[in-house]
């Protein structure tokens, strides 16, 4: 292999998933080196299914179909946040587990990110709102019109977070505001 072949960045497809039991967001990006672009994004509507078991079946089928169609190199999921309602957490965890099982059945590596890590990676603020994340993605990914359901943009944020962190050692508590964030991420400054 020549030096030029080694320098050539490899294209990768990342599937980001924002798990849910009513609406599950998904977003696919194509990356090449530091460049990235949207392939597809959307939501899986689950409210119409009467039982939790049917919802889980539909999640497995739809995620499997997306994996078959796009053959992503990796899957990134947003980890469930800790809530007060134990039953909701359990159902959300099952939904995430079924999405993970779909990827594992195709031997696609999975990475999980906390909601705070995703928001921090995309906006520089771990406490950003869904609307702030969507607005930043609109800029970063050139989205003409934001979707009505921001679960789709949340999933794109998870995929982009994975791209930004892929191959890097994960550390905690290093970022101390915008100045530190910009110093640590010079490639993220739009000129």
Image (cartoon, helix red, strand yellow):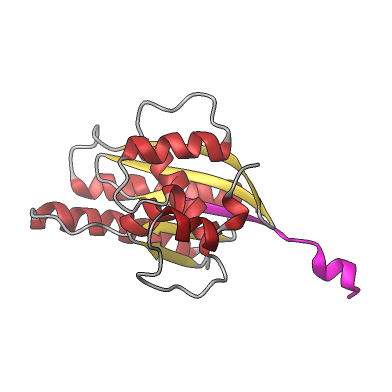
Residue 130 place in picture, x, y as percent:
32, 39
Taking the spot 45% from the left edge, 49% from the top edge, the residue there is: 122
Res 182 seen here: yes
* Residue 10 falls inside the magenta stretch: yes
Residue 115 place in picture, x, y as percent:
32, 55
* Residue 138 falls inside the magenta stretch: no
| Location of residue 11 with respect to 43 vertically, above or below | below
Q: Looking at this view, is 106 or 39 the one in front? A: 39
Taking the spot 49% from the left edge, 52% from the top edge, the residue there is: 159
Taking the spot 41% from the left edge, 50% from the top edge, the residue there is: 17
Screen quadrant of the C terminus: top right
Magenta-highlighted residues: 1-16
Residue 33 place in picture, x, y as percent:
69, 58
Q: Left or right: 108 with respect to 63?
A: right
| Location of residue 74 with respect to 140 vertically, above or below | below
Q: Looking at this view, is 103 or 134 the one in front? A: 134
Taking the spot 64% from the left edge, 52% from the top edge, the residue there is: 31
Q: Looking at this view, is 77 or 167 the one in front? A: 167
* Number of callouts: 0
Quarter of the image where one finds residue 149: top left
């Amino acid at each position: 292999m020549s030096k030029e072949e080694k320098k050539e960045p490899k294209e990768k497809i990342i599937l980001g998933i924002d798990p849910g039991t009513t609406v599950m967001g998904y977003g696919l990006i194509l990356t090449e080196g530091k460049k990235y672009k949207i392939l597809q994004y959307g939501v899986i509507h689950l409210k119409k299914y009467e039982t939790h078991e049917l919802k889980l079946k539909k999640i497995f089928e739809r995620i499997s179909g997306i994996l078959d169609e796009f053959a992503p190199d990796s899957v990134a999921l947003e980890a469930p946040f800790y809530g007060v309602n134990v039953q909701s957490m359990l159902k959300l965890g099952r939904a995430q587990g079924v999405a993970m099982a779909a990827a594992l059945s195709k031997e696609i590596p999975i990475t999980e990110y906390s909601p705070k890590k995703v928001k921090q990676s995309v906006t520089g603020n771990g406490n950003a709102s869904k609307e702030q994340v969507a607005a930043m993605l609109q800029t970063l990914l050139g989205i003409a019109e934001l979707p009505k359901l921001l679960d789709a943009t949340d999933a794109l944020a998870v995929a982009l977070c994975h791209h930004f962190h892929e191959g890097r050692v994960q550390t905690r508590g290093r970022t101390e505001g915008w100045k530190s964030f910009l110093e640590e991420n010079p490639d993220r400054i739009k000129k």
